[in-house]
Amino acid sequence: MSSTANISTRTPDQLGASRAKAADNSTGKTPGPHRSKHRRLWWTTLAVGVVAVIVNVPWFNALIVSFKSDGDISRGALALGHPTTDHYANSLGAAGYDFPRFFLNSGMIALGAVALVLLIAVPSTYAAIRLGFGGRFIMNASSALRLLPAIFFAVPYFLLMSNLGLLDTVPGLILANTFLNLPLAIILLGAGFRDVPIELEEAAQVDGASTYRILYSVLLPILAPTLVAVSVLVFIFSWNDYLFALVLSSSNATPITLGAANFVTSTGIRWGDISAATVLSTLPPVLFAVFAQRFLVSGLSAGAVKG
Amino acid sequence: MAATTASRGAAAKWVLGSPLILFAAIFVAYPVYQGIQTGFFGLSLQNPEVPFTGLSNFTTVLTDPGFLAAARFTILFALAVTALETVLGFGLALLMNRQFPGKRVFFTMLLVPIMIAPALMGVMFRLLLNGDIGLVPALLHGVGIDISLFAPDTVVPLLVLLDVLQWTPFTFLIIYAGLQSFPTDVLEAAQIDGAGWWRTLGSVVLPIMRPIIFAAVFLRLIDAIRTFDVIYVLTAGGPGTKTTTMSIYIYKTAFESGQFGMAAAASTIVMIALVPFVPLLVKRIVHPGRGAA
């Protein structure tokens, strides 16, 4: 975990450094290689900065529109006037939209999925890695499931949830998102359990601890960073789900992704209000990107490489 | 699984594994069975009688021009965006692989598009590209270009561009994370041997990074093949059926036309087409060896 934890701050600087050194070696004629290196770093800042801004233009644009008055919005994208917070008040309930309920649904679905994924994945992955439960099959099936397109499960899940009476309910969407995220959780936890030295468990066993006790008191504290990474990723992916929300919910359990998209496809769009609602609904994932970055990076890259 | 301690937990493994068994039986195995089985029946919202129709759904789907067009669009779209995003992501990873002022802030900013829900990205794209109030048409108008971005001949390049905008950060992240575990001594050796920057890149970095790049390509390809959210929110598969992906085709067949049997048959065909890749990918991605870990 620690090897990937703070990727952004670590400075191996490999290719860049070797490039700089190679340049230093070959530039005996040009005076002041130090200054040229310095200048190149600022060019890097500029180039990366431009890319970092461009990929976030949609979000910045929505942020700006969300603070413009309806009149300023209708005068065109380049017209700026006095900023207003009306749209945030509207989307949080003042205008009678359903957005507060959509936010609540998204939150319950995402938290429910995190809890259920951990409840299922932690004990069974431990059993699979250390106790021989299912052998390799569980790890391989998890990888395979992650590769199959989610749309395959749209029709069967619709039929299943309607048979169970869980269509358009929060528990139904919690179950669907648990299904969607379980493979990733098992893959990440599998890598985590494998990295714990088995001597720790053997020592605990000699001390008379039961298997359950070892899992709960010895392994879970050690695996806390992995558990956080899994929780953050499952929360974000569940919060972001759209396809299963579209298939399985119609009004009561609608999460914010579906609510916002429906709003924008309907006629007479209130762009200011929808922008405010959209910015608000991107906040949890964006805040995670800022404050839980090391968990995201380690989880995403480990999940990518290992699963 | 050499670490298995068979001496303890013969019963415990079933106790600990039972939640997964229960969940997998109801919410994985049964839906897979039902997904395949439904394809053999004429199940639809209009027809609750459910007659057995054998392979007729499958032959209908395979001869449907709409399905074939969706398959073609999906594959070409996925190949185009994956190629672009891999090249750009790799370049960005090389660029970021040194210390420079502002690195931490930009790194965080590059993560943001990956975190945002594709459906909400679709909403924000609509706002950005809106003909009346959008920033992009306004800027284009400012330099004298007045085109309809969603017209039949511009919509496909537009969707490719938007996908590149959102997902290049993902390929960047995977490749960048891989670069962090790159063996430095190999680079020094190449340098001592007098290899230039391009030579080092081609003969040393790329071969060692191959598993990582393969992982990035493969993950993007898989996600691009199942693209649904952004395109559905932006164009709903139109104009006409021009931007209908496989996922949109299946969704519309099931939930707009109400033909569950047809949709399930199409899903099964897509799954069968992807299944041969699974063992290869499980092997290469899950156990890529030390170099990629």
Image: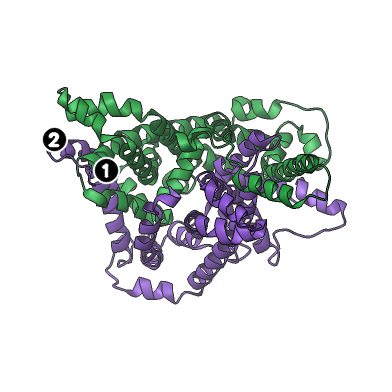
Chain colours: A green, B purple
Determine which residue is flagged by label 1. Answer: B23
Query: Looking at the image, can residue B105 be seen?
Result: yes
> Which amino acid, mark 1?
Phe
Q: Position of residue A131 (x, y in %)?
A: 19, 40
User: How dense is the environment of label 1, judged by Cα within 10 Å: few (below 14), some, or many (20 and up)?
Assistant: some
Q: Position of residue B23 (x, y in %)?
A: 26, 43
Identify whether B282 is placed above or below A272. Answer: below
Q: Earlier in the sequence, mark 2 or mark 1?
A: 2
- Secondary structure beneath disc 1? helix
- Secondary structure beneath disc 2? loop
Identify whether A78 is placed above or below B162. Answer: above
Q: Which residue lies at the image location 50% right of the left edge and 56% below the top edge?
A: B208
Count numbered badges in the picture: 2
- Whether residues under marks 2 and 1 lie with C-beta atoms below 8 angstroms apart, the answer is no
Identify whether B184 is placed above or below B245. Answer: above
Q: Position of residue A30 (x, y in %)?
A: 83, 48
Left or right: where does residue A288 sit relative to residue B292?
Answer: right
Q: How far apart are the two marked residues, 2 and 1, measured between alpha carbons?
A: 25 Å
Of residues A222 and A240, the one nearer the viewer is A222
Q: Position of residue A107 (x, y in %)?
A: 47, 31
Nearest to viewer (mark 2 / mark 1): 2
Left or right: where does residue A203 sit relative to residue B118?
Answer: left
Q: Which residue lies at the image location 71% right of the left edge and 35% below the top edge?
A: B101
> Which amino acid, mark 2?
Arg
Quadrant housing the N terminus of chain A: top left
Determine which residue is flagged by label 2. Answer: B8
Of residues A280 and A205, the one nearer the viewer is A205
- Pointers 2 and 1 within a single chain: yes
Of residues A173 and A282, the one nearer the viewer is A282
User: How dense is the environment of label 2, judged by Cα within 10 Å: few (below 14), some, or many (20 and up)?
Assistant: some
Tell me which corner region of the image, top left, top right, bottom left or bottom right, holds residue A175. Answer: top left
Q: Which residue lies at the image location 30% right of the left edge and 68% below the top edge?
A: B40
